[in-house]
Amino acid sequence: MDNHKHPYYGWYIVISASVICLLTMGMRMGIGPFMEPIMADLDLSRTELSFIVAIGMIVYGMGMPIAGLLVSTFSTRFMMLTGLTIVCLSIVGTVSSKGLVSFLLFFGVFLSLGLSFLSNISFAPIISKWFIRQKGKALFYLSTGGMAGIAIMTPLEMWLIHLVGWQQTLLIFAGVFICIVTPSAIFVMREDVPKGADSKGTVCKQERQVSTDITLRDALKTKAYWQIVLGLFACGFGMNLLGSHGVPMLMDHGYEPMVASFGIGTIGVVAIFSTIILGQIADRFPRKNILFLVYFVRGLGFFGLVLAATNWQLFIVAISGGLVWSGSIAMSTAIISDLFGQRLLGILNGWAFFIGHQIAAALGSFLGGRLYEVFGTHFLSFSTAGALAIIASLASIRLPQHISYPKQIKLGEQHNLVK
């Protein structure tokens, strides 16, 4: 179905979704620069603000299955416009907040819900529809948007906050969301995939024929699914610990605010290019091997980051960590699709992300602040993130190439997804 004169249309969807994910991840993972000014303006302690961020992470995860329901019931376009509306209204409420309760409601709950509708997990089903042979590459390129969000938005947010304040910075980003999401939803997103698209008569060697009789309950009984969830738990804990407390941690260690933000941003810059490279090999090598490498090196990076004592050490660790910072979500999504099929991808991916990634994200965001206030050090939280990532790497390398269902699972009794 490829036309030599025009790029494959699915890539327009990937590009559009990646730009939106840049904004979403920049808002979700870029909370670090907002921490100090919000605490000062609203008279919140680090623990209180960390608790609000943690609640937001849980709501963000809970929004994934809701987004999947909106896509299956209505369309990707409807999901995007609904998310945009919630994001803009919640930002208006956030900048008007005067205390803990209102800030928790608008920033912690509603903004997180709206952003979940505009996340990479929510775009994964439509991209997986458009890509079969190049699924791994497409999902990795989707992750590029998230990495760019960390790289671009973290220093940009720090600069804008110093220039106009945190409230005006949020309003600026609300306007950017409107300008990007609206035309993307109306003019780019298409659900009607041409027959045989991205197949060229062949199927990726990792793409297996999966029984359509497999149900959600069948999948939940497999060890492989929970190995993937464990990996996402480590991913969520570490990524959101870094997003919420990376900049404050480095500032507490004596780094200037802009050096700290550029240090964290460097991870995202390097991850943009590493994502492109990983995307090229995602469909050529066993996905579990790539996932092992991503988690293992990332685990070492967390130990290095909290122990860095000079600028050059910080940026060496940031560059090393950026090489493997992306890919865990893309590879996990691709593996779920390989093992359980396209039909179950949306619901299995949504629940894996919520149960694993976002529960851990809440813990990482909260414990990062709480452990520092109790023990006066960031080493406990960041070393925990490193240890979890290494454990996840060991679980990932043991993932099977295909599922052998336990004898007690009888496939095909009903075609209901949740049987």
Image (tube, rainbow, N blue to C red):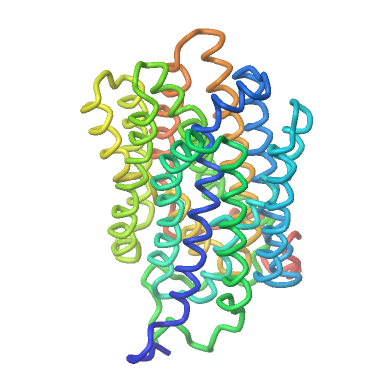
Relative to 379, residue 33 above or below: below
Location of residue 146 in the rendering, given as x and y in whole percent from the top left corner: 46, 52
Q: In this view, does 50 lie to the left or right of 103?
A: left
> Which quadrant is home to the C terminus?
bottom right
Q: Which residue is at 70% across, 42% downward?
A: 59
Task: Give the camera-side residue of 266 and 156.
Answer: 156
User: Which residue sits furthest front?
Assistant: 164
**Quarter of the rendering containing residue 182:** bottom right
Location of residue 44 in the rendering, given as x and y in whole percent from the top left corner: 66, 20
Task: Give the camera-side residue of 405 and 158.
Answer: 158
Tell me how many marks there are.
0
Location of residue 283 in the rendering, given as x and y in whole percent from the top left corner: 34, 66
Task: Give the camera-side residue of 399 and 48.
Answer: 48
Q: In this view, does 291 lie to the left or right of 51?
A: left
Q: Which residue is at 30% across, 26% downward?
A: 304
Location of residue 370 in the rendering, given as x and y in whole percent from the top left corner: 58, 17
Q: Which residue is at 45% across, 49% downward?
A: 149
Q: Which residue is at 59% across, 53% downward?
A: 406
Task: Give the camera-side residue of 266 and 222.
Answer: 266
User: Which residue sits furthest top?
Assistant: 375
**Quarter of the rendering containing residue 357:** top right
> Which quadrant is home to the N terminus?
bottom left
